[in-house]
Amino acid sequence: MVIKKTKKIGDDFLWGASTSAYQVEGANLIDGKGPSVQDVKKVPEGTSELDVCADFYHRYKEDIALMAEMGFRTFRFSVAWSRILPKGAGEVNPKGIAFYNNVIDECLKYGIEPLITMFHFDLPQALEEQGGWSRRGIIDDFVNFAKVMYENFGDRVKYWLTINEQNMLTLAGEVIGTCNLQGVENKYKKLYQENHHMLLAQAKAMKLCHDMLPGAKIGPAPNISLVYPATCKPKDVLAAQNFNAIRNWLYLDMAVYGEYNHLVWHFLEEHDAVPDIEPGDMDIMKEGHPDFIGFNYYSTATVEWDASEGEATLGDQQSGAAEPGVFRGYANPNLLRTEFGWEIDPDGFRATMREMYSRYRLPMIVTENGLGAYDKLEADGKIHDDYRIEYLRRHIEQIKLAVSEGVEMMGYCPWSAIDLISTHEGMVKRYGFIYVNRDEFDLKDMARYRKDSFYWYKKVIETNAEEL
């Protein structure tokens, strides 16, 4: 609908931005940190290793000061599991605890609320060698990890996220480097059993949060991408419903309602991939009760009907995938694309918020949204990223419209606060408001520079998005 009576974003809206530990911290095997799956993986050819990244580990004070200069009200970051528990379980690393205590205290010094993601693609390698998420015992390992965090940080951290992009760990793990399916006879059975364990771990961690930290709030953080039918053909609509269920609603239906989505359940039956569910599992699922939904949004997806047989086609978080007999990805001719091929759909952002709020009626916070680009540092130390400003402006406009329509939005944390190593496309794909002076392999001086978007976002926060 055309909105003539607009409502303002609330004064308590949490403006900020996001990072993740393995992509920004560096210092990956020092001060007692154990290796994670990210530390031992073979990075894509032509991309940087993850041993330095943006060196946030040593420069967090400088970086958080810059975030404070922008006016951040929250900072979403993740805790590296193997920095806290080097082997994933057992002995706690005091230097890891000290580091995150320092980061939290530095945020609070400036009035920035820490928003902690518990798990962001970096499973401890010691747990991976024991079977990773396929081993049922990892549920208790994750809950113990959550307990250690609640005990050490819960007196100061009010907002928690469980598992970043759990749906992408299931759907695109091979692309983002979090799973190896070589030699696996039925990949669906393996992936959706692991997914079941993650769902149980999430539900138990949410319940434990409420038990240990009564004043805290916690929620999931999937990557949500509303799916369009390629045409108005009824079968294309069915394909869109299929992919919406598989990509989006499975994860939120379980987090909010503690129930498996019925379309996905049938998909699993078709692939002999129904997970092994032990007595009491579904009772545990219903005890999670998230307080809010965090979600990552970059674009929508478009699909058409596919009645063929054959092998599935992999995609990353946003690029097209196909599942024979279920759906086939379709390039939307109505959308522009980024330099890295991701479609740009601000209107779809609003459509996604509408659909999520209609289904779940929980407050929502955007935990990622942004544009990756080949930013250039000019000779005068400036970075003119007007393209990023335009991207973010158009998406924030849609938040304002969604709020006017009654959608309860509690915050916006675009990706990313500072340049970091992109999931599988390296340092060259930059997202940050803050430029880090390094190349893919040449570390240079790692100096920080404020991009044009830095100053623009500062004004957005100052005016609570009244000036875009």
Image (cartoon, helix red, strand yellow):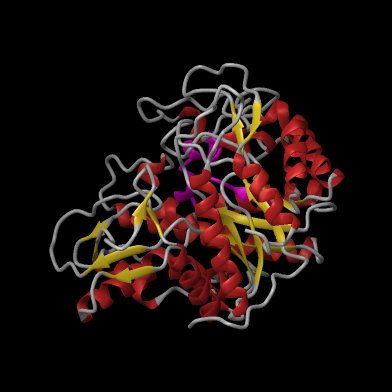
Q: Locate residue 308, reporting x and y percent.
A: 13, 64
Q: Quadrant of residue 78?
A: top right
Assign the C terminus to one quadrant of the image.
bottom right
- Residue 295 shows in this picture: no
The front one of 47 and 158 is: 47
Q: Residue at x 25, y 61 (%)?
A: 330
The front one of 320 and 376 is: 376
The front one of 435 and 34 is: 435
Q: Quadrant of residue 215?
A: bottom right
Q: Locate residue 210, reporting x and y percent.
A: 75, 66
Q: Locate residue 355, reporting x and y percent.
A: 48, 76
Q: Locate residue 459, reporting x and y percent.
A: 70, 52
Q: Quadrant of residue 238?
A: bottom left
**Above or below, 396 relative to 239:** above
In magenta stretch: residue 87: no
**Above or below, 43 relative to 405:** above
How many numbered circles are shown? 0
In magenta stretch: residue 124: yes
Q: Residue at x 69, y 26 (%)?
A: 32
In the rendered structure, which segment of residues is drawn in magenta?
Answer: 116-136
Q: Residue at x 33, y 57 (%)?
A: 189
- Residue 262 shows in this picture: yes
